[in-house]
Amino acid sequence: MGPPQHGRKCAKVQDPGRRRPRRRLCLLKGCEKPFQPSHPQARYCSEACRQAARRWRAWRARQRYRATDQGKACRRSQSRRYRERARASQRSAASQSRTRRRGAADLTVSEGREGQRPAHVCKKSLCDRPGCYTCFDPHPRSPLQRFCSSLCRCALQRVLEREARWRRRCLRRRIERRSG
C-alpha cells in the first residue's frame, strides 16, 4: 500500500462525510454535455436545459391530452371557432376591397387547409426522454415500448438508476443515525 493520494492538508479542508458528485452527462436530448452537478440529483447542465425540459414536459402533456376524447372534442371546437373567424375576416376583407376600387382583384387567402396533419406526425407513441420530440410506432413484439431508440432508453435508465442508488444511500444513512 502506497502513500495517500492527497496530503493531510486536503483532508482538513474537505468534509469527510460529504463527497462532490462526479461529472455526468446532461439528460436533455441534443445537449448531452458533461457537467459537474451542484446537487446529487441534478439532471441538466444549465438553466437553459432545465427550461427546455420543462417546455418538453408541457408539450408532452398537451399531446397526451389531445389523444383523449375530451381533448379531441376541445380541439374540434377550437378549429370550428377558428374557421368561423377566418370566414368572417374573408367576408370583411372582400367587402372592403370592393368598396375601395371596383374591378380590383380580390384578396387571396392562403390555400393551406386547416386540419391536415403533416405526414411525419404519428399518433402512436411519444419518446419518454426529455427533449426528444420523436414520435414512433411501437414494435409489434413490444407494444409497451416507451423510447424511440436504445440511446434514449439507456440515457434515462442511467439517470433513474443513479437516483435510486442515491435514495438507497440516504435511507441507509438515516437508519444508521437512528440505530447509532
Image: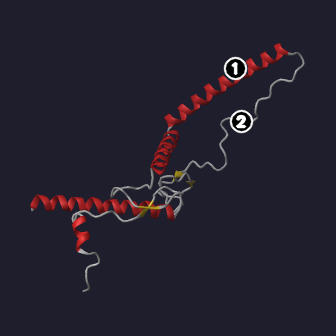
Q: Position of residue 141 (x, y in %)?
A: 51, 63
Pick the residue in front: 179 or 46.
46
Disc 2 is placed on an element classified as loop
Provide the residue designation for mark 2: 113
What residue is rendered at 78% in x and 16% in y? Answer: 96
* C-alpha distance separating marks 2 and 1: 17 Å
Please tell me in which quadrant of the rendered image residue 77 appears: top right
Please tell me in which quadrant of the rendered image residue 154 appears: bottom left
Provide the residue designation for mark 1: 88
Residue 81 falls left or right of residue 98: left
Pick the residue in front: 126 or 6.
6
Q: Amino acid at mark 2?
A: Arg
Crowding at dot 1, Cα within 10 Å, few <14 / some 14-19 / many 20+, comes out as: few
User: In which quadrant will I find the C terminus?
Assistant: bottom left
Is the C-beta separation of discs 2 and 1 under 8 Å? Answer: no
Please tell me in which quadrant of the rendered image residue 13 appears: bottom left
Disc 1 is placed on an element classified as helix
What residue is rendered at 65% in x and 36% in y? Answer: 115
Of mark 2 and mark 1, the one earlier in the sequence is 1
Pick the residue in front: 90 or 38.
38
What residue is rendered at 37% in x and 55% in y? Answer: 42
Residue 151 falls left or right of residue 118: left
Q: Position of residue 136 (x, y in %)?
A: 56, 55
Q: Position of residue 79 (x, y in %)?
A: 61, 30
